[in-house]
Amino acid sequence: MKTLFLLRHAKSSWDDRSVRDFDRPLNERGLNAAPLVGELLRARGIRPQRIICSPAERTRQTIALVLRAAGLAEEVHFNGRIYEANLRQLLDIVREIDDAVETALLVGHNYGIENLLAHLTGDARHMPTAALAHIVLEVEAWRDARENAGRLEFFVRPKDLSG
């Protein structure tokens, strides 16, 4: 079995319309939400062996805040294919994970992240910003990740963590 966490970036700012989408930073709400996810990882003892993240500014900021709050110093692997990726592209990225890795965290964007969750688990959910999904894949090798091969263990949104 393999374990995959899907994290959508925290809420980004639209204050400056001249900033390219790729370069948009987190807004105040996002800056507050991302550490809540990290605190959850710390509380549950979750330590991903591989972190794969979109290189967009909002995902970079999200994972930095999550890791800091979680007390983790794992290397982050930035993959430009995640930015604006569709389901097939994300599935390819998951299937490329080294089989020595048992637990991976993929940090990306909608609608790709939502579609990947639904594809792997059959559980279609809206993933608001900073939502985290924990999926257990009933596969021995990442390359075997496929439709309905996974089970959603838990799903949390920032509003579930802030109260």
Image (tube, rainbow, N blue to C red):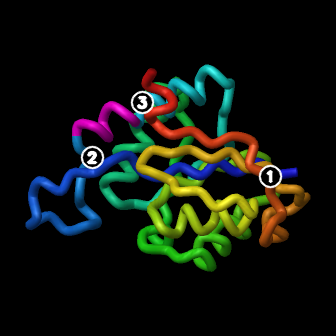
Tags 2 and 3 touching, CB below 8 Å: no
Side (left or right) of 130 relative to 16: right
Q: How far apart are marks 2 and 3 (CA)?
A: 12 Å
Per the image, the residue denoted by label 3 is 35
Q: Position of residue 9 (x, y in %)?
A: 42, 51
* Mark 1 crowd level (few <14, some 14–19, many ≥20, 10 Å Cα): some
Q: Which label's residue is closer to the chain start, 2 or 3? A: 2
Task: Give the amino acid at mark 3.
Answer: Pro
Q: Distance between the residues labelled 1 and 2?
A: 30 Å
* Mark 2 crowd level (few <14, some 14–19, many ≥20, 10 Å Cα): many
Q: Position of residue 88 (x, y in %)?
A: 62, 79
Q: Is residue 86 above or below residue 23?
A: below
**Principal secondary structure, stretch drawn in magenta:** helix
- In the rendered image, residue 32 lying in the magenta stretch gets the answer yes
Q: Which mark is residue 151?
A: 1
Foreground tag (3 vs 1): 1
Task: Give the amino acid at mark 1.
Answer: Arg
- In the rendered image, residue 63 lying in the magenta stretch gets the answer no
Residue closest to the eye, 77 or 142 = 142
Give, as a single range, the part of the protein colored magenta.
Answer: 28-33
Per the image, the residue denoted by label 2 is 26
Residue closest to the eye, 123 or 136 = 123
Q: What element carries label 1?
A: strand
Q: Position of residue 123 (x, y in %)?
A: 70, 59
* Mark 3 crowd level (few <14, some 14–19, many ≥20, 10 Å Cα): many
Side (left or right) of 131 relative to 31: right
- Residue at the location (73% across, 69% down)? 95
- The quadrant in which residue 162 appears is top left
Side (left or right) of 158 relative to 91: left
Side (left or right) of 150 relative to 91: right
Tags 3 and 1 touching, CB below 8 Å: no
Q: Which label's residue is closer to the chain start, 3 or 1? A: 3
